[in-house]
Image (tube, rainbow, N blue to C red):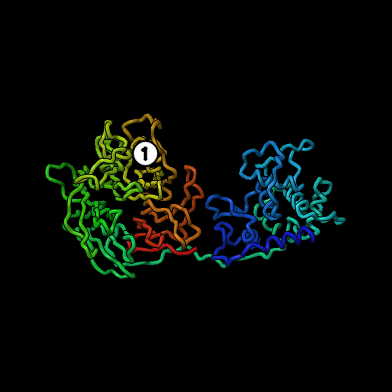
């Protein structure tokens, strides 16, 4: 039995399953070699290029020698070996595959005549790929000279051997009289060669449907947030004017809470956020953050209130308000603010810097005021609340409630596991997304010394020192928008092309963006505006099925993310 026939037998043992729309990977849709990529993925010759997620293949990246070793080792089903052939691959994640190739005589190294090195991170040329494949498949010598650009090349024989087997047909269609031996070989091209070498059938998946918003409900008045009560098939929708409405099956079915007599609804003021206790429905409490009349003895434009309500036993309404916290606001704008319970069970609340422009009271970094902060309180430990003992300013100068400082107007933010993603609305230069772990470290996001990563020339401190500051993972300027709406990380089952991506928007420009957060950085950034863009996106939420919801303030509607 030839090596090629043996390989076919081995590979036939792997189960091939039906492909979902768009296929295994999200970055090869429509690629001329997508069918070949799917073919080697089905045989588990490749798992992707971005572990641990592995939803991307990186088809146009040039393959490294280590990656080539792994693909061939899997294709040949080479056994483990005790051989340690090279000195430069110690500890490499693919060291085992490299040694398996060496033990099988498929590679001799990269530094003749010593050949004690493999050069695992060096990219592979097309000629080197031909050498690997010709040896891996034991293809006999060829008497045919297929190409005009490899004459005298040290690997000309290998090139002609794989051309004999139609593993390659050249590099310059339609004439294909050239092989381009010194060009780097891409991951997609290797997939094509392996598919032909192993006699696999290219597998072209059904097309992926385009990203879109599907309407869930409309007929709302200035909706500001949607909440999905756990274990229920309804949604709670907060309107800025003070109503919290119930929707089921696309219909508005009732009023859950009416705060219209308590709320000042004008400009940036109003009902801003609601949140259920994390033990709901066992703990039937709802929390609301809203703009109200100035409290007795207060100073400034108005007061923002954090209020706790009891939910009725039938879960259809809330009443019996109890004030938890009241914060005076010097001006009408920059009220924040969003409520959410963290993975630690504490309630987090974001507050803006008090308003006007350029933080005239220098409040955002003043640790003796809650304005311009993310605060963290324990609503179960005492009445009205207790202070978590590990908050960063407990026992130090500063308000004990403060968890982070230096924020301008953190209107929308979210948790994803142990990470917090904050959308902080800028002044005149930058809109920013801050991403930090949920640890009580007292992050200072820099406003008003910095707007994003740009030093603010209007700040009272012109030093521009970056010491002790936490800077955005991503930001954008005024050419793309003017009011960032912090989003959520999508991990649902439907929209595979956005799995693990943080999706956010700009309220004013209508642009929608996404990135994947990895190793402390925003990676794989995308502009989704062509499919999802619409002005007025004011809030995002994940429903009980893991799908993404978005609230359109101007259209008075809630949408669900759909597509591939």
Where residue 146 sits, quadrant-wise, is bottom right
Point out the residue furthest to the left here: 296
Point out the residue furthest to the top here: 463
Q: Position of residue 561 (x, y in %)?
A: 42, 62
Q: Position of residue 291 (x, y in %)?
A: 21, 51
In the figure, 558 relative to 395: above or below? below
Point out the residue furthest to the front here: 82
In the figure, 450 relative to 137: above or below? above
Residue at the spot 22% in from the left edge and 55% down from the top edge: 265
Residue at the spot 81% in from the left edge and 54% down from the top edge: 160
* Left or right: where 536 falls relative to 182: left
Question: Which part of the image, by quadrant, shows the N terminus?
Answer: bottom right
In the figure, 331 relative to 193: above or below? above
* Left or right: where 321 falls relative to 111: left
Residue 55 visible somewhere in the drawing: yes
Residue 366 visible somewhere in the drawing: no
Q: Position of residue 350 (x, y in %)?
A: 30, 46
Where residue 510 sits, quadrant-wise, is bottom left
Residue at the spot 27% in from the left edge and 32% down from the top edge: 395
Residue at the spot 65% in from the left edge and 43% down from the top edge: 95
Point out the residue furthest to the right here: 143
Q: Which residue is mark 1?
A: 445
What is the crowding at mark 1: few (fewer than 14 residues within 10 Å), some, or many (at least 20)? Answer: many
Tally the marks.
1
**Kind of element beneath mark 1:** loop
Q: Position of residue 315 (x, y in %)?
A: 24, 63
* Left or right: where 509 falls relative to 260: right
């Amino acid at each position: 039995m030839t090596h090629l026939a043996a390989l076919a037998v081995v590979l036939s043992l792997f189960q091939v399953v039906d492909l979902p729309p768009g296929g295994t990977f999200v970055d090869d849709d429509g690629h001329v070699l997508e069918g070949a990529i799917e073919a080697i993925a089905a045989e588990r010759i490749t798992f992707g290029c971005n572990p641990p997620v592995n939803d991307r293949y990186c088809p146009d990246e040039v393959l490294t020698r280590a990656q080539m070793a792994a693909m061939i080792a899997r294709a040949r089903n080479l056994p483990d070996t005790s051989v340690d052939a090279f000195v430069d691959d110690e500890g490499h994640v693919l060291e085992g595959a490299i040694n398996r190739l060496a033990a099988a005589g498929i590679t001799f190294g990269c530094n003749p005549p010593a050949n004690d090195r493999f050069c695992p991170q060096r990219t592979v040329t097309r000629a080197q790929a031909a050498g690997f494949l010709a040896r891996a498949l034991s293809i006999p010598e060829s008497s045919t000279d297929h190409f005009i650009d490899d004459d005298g090349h040290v690997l000309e024989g290998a090139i002609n051997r794989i051309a004999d087997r139609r593993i390659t047909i050249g590099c310059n269609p339609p004439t294909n009289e050239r092989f381009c031996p010194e060009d780097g070989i891409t991951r997609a091209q290797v997939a094509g060669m392996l598919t032909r070498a192993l006699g696999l059938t290219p597998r072209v998946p059904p097309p992926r449907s385009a990203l879109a918003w599907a309407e869930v409900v409309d007929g709302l008045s200035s909706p500001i947030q949607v909440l999905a009560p756990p274990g229920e098939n309804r949604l709670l929708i907060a309107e800025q004017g003070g109503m919290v409405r119930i929707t089921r099956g696309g219909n508005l079915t009732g009023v859950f809470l009416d705060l219209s007599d308590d709320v000042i609804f004008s400009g940036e003021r109003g009902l801003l956020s609601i949140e259920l206790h994390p033990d709901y429905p066992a703990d039937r409490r709802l929390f609301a953050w809203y703009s109200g009349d100035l409290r007795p003895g207060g100073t400034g434009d108005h007061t923002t209130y954090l209020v706790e309500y009891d939910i009725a036993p039938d879960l259809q309404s809330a009443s019996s308000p109890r004030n938890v916290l009241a914060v005076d606001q010097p001006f009408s704008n920059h009220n924040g603010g969003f409520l959410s319970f963290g993975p630690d069970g504490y309630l987090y609340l974001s507050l803006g810097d008090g308003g006007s422009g350029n933080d005239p009271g220098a409040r955002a970094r003043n640790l003796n005021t809650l304005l311009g902060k993310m605060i963290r309180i324990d609503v179960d430990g005492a009445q009205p609340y207790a202070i978590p003992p590990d908050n960063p300013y407990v026992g130090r100068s500063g308000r004990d409630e403060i968890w982070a400082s230096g924020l301008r107007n953190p209107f929308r933010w979210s948790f994803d596991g142990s990470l917090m993603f904050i959308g902080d609305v800028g002044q005149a230069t930058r809109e920013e997304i801050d991403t930090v772990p949920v640890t009580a470290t007292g992050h200072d996001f820099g406003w008003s010394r910095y707007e994003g990563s740009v030093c603010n020339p209007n700040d009272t401190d012109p030093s521009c020192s970056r010491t002790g500051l936490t800077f955005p993972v991503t930001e954008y300027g005024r050419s793309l928008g003017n009011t960032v709406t912090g989003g959520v990380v999508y991990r649902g089952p439907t929209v595979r092309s956005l799995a693990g991506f943080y999706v956010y928007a700009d309220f004013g420009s209508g642009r929608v963006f996404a990135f994947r957060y990895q190793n402390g950085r925003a990676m794989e950034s995308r502009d989704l505006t062509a499919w999802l863009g619409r002005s007025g996106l004011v809030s995002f939420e994940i429903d009980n099925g893991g799908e993404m919801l978005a609230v359109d303030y101007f259209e008075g509607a809630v949408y669900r993310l759909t597509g591939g």
